[in-house]
Amino acid sequence: MTFSGAIFRTACYLIKHQNIKRKCVRLEKKGDIAERDKLVKQYVPGWATYMINLVGGKETVVNVKGAENIPKDGSVVFIANHQSYLDIPLIISSSRMVMGFIAKYEILKIPLLSGWMKLMQCVFLKRKSPHQSVQAMTKAVDTIKKGYSLVIFPEGHRSRCDQIKQFHHGSFKLAFRSEVPIVPVTIDGSFHLYEEYKKPMPATINVTFHPPVKTAGLSKEQKDKIPDEVFNTIKAVLPHQEA
């Protein structure tokens, strides 16, 4: 399948399930947030799995390790390395959870996708607007404190390969301000799905959820150590890393 073909089939899938999104929106307008979230949690992991299978095909294998490390109660910040466009559906599918993420503000112009992203509690960021960036960070903290989890990719951009780039320490401020646990996630092999050959391909992918890292009640010195500790935890199970 071509990449444009995958986009077309994704759009068809979203159109087919528009009734579910409309029901979620109606529940939200009625103030029935619990039922809205329940319906979102029933739908989104299935969509995420569909995306992985659509791009990678039946030959794709996703090995999940450490899912038991994800706290059962409360929100968390997932910190992961970033190899592929498919990393977010991959984490959702592997965890069987719904989580939001920081997205480009321009995505709001894509109705089929942005509607679902709002229901997933994604936060939209104007990178060239410092004022809006501050507002987006405040909203992200409030979102987490309301009990919704978010995923952050501290590399900033996709590596498109099996090498991990250094983390931007500022990405950890969200977890520190929210005082929720960080769950480090290692993604190994997702770039094979598309980025390696610039076309959809089957792949074997390993997703590892590491034990949570406490962020509440820490001193500045303790917080300063966490980005490097999380980086090393994620890197440790990636193969073929440069020294």
Image (cartoon, grey):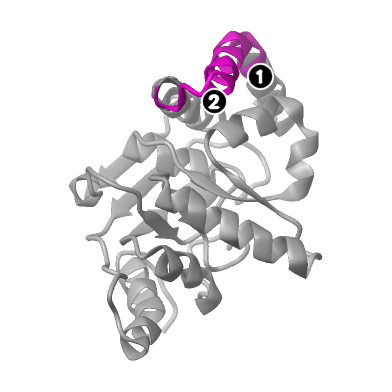
Pinpoint residue 92: horizontal percent, then vertical percent. 42, 38
Q: Are marks 1 and 2 in contact (CB under 8 Å)?
A: yes
In the picture as drawn, the residue positioned furthest to the front comes out as 31
Residue 63: quadrant of the picture: top left
Q: Residues within 10 Å of mark 1 (few under 14, many from 20)?
A: some
Residue denoted by label 1: 9
Screen quadrant of the N terminus: top right
Residue at x 39% of width, y 73% of height: 231
- In-image side of 138 versus 135 (left or right): left
Residue at x 35% of width, y 49% of height: 75
In the image, residue 243 sits, relative to residue 44, either above or below, namely: below
Residue at x 67% of width, y 13% of height: 15
Query: Which type of secondary structure does the marked residue at label 2 adopt?
Result: helix
Q: Main secondary structure of the magenta part?
A: helix
The CA span between labels 1 and 2 is: 8 Å
Which amino acid does the dot numbered 1 rest on? Arg
- Whether residue 158 is visible here, answered yes or no, is no
In the image, residue 196 sits, relative to residue 52, either above or below, namely: below
Which amino acid does the dot numbered 2 rest on? Leu
- Whether residue 186 is visible here, answered yes or no, is yes
Q: Residues within 10 Å of mark 2 (few under 14, many from 20)?
A: many
Residue denoted by label 2: 54
In this picture, which residue range is highlighted in magenta? 14-34
- Residue 39 within the magenta-colored segment of the rendering: no
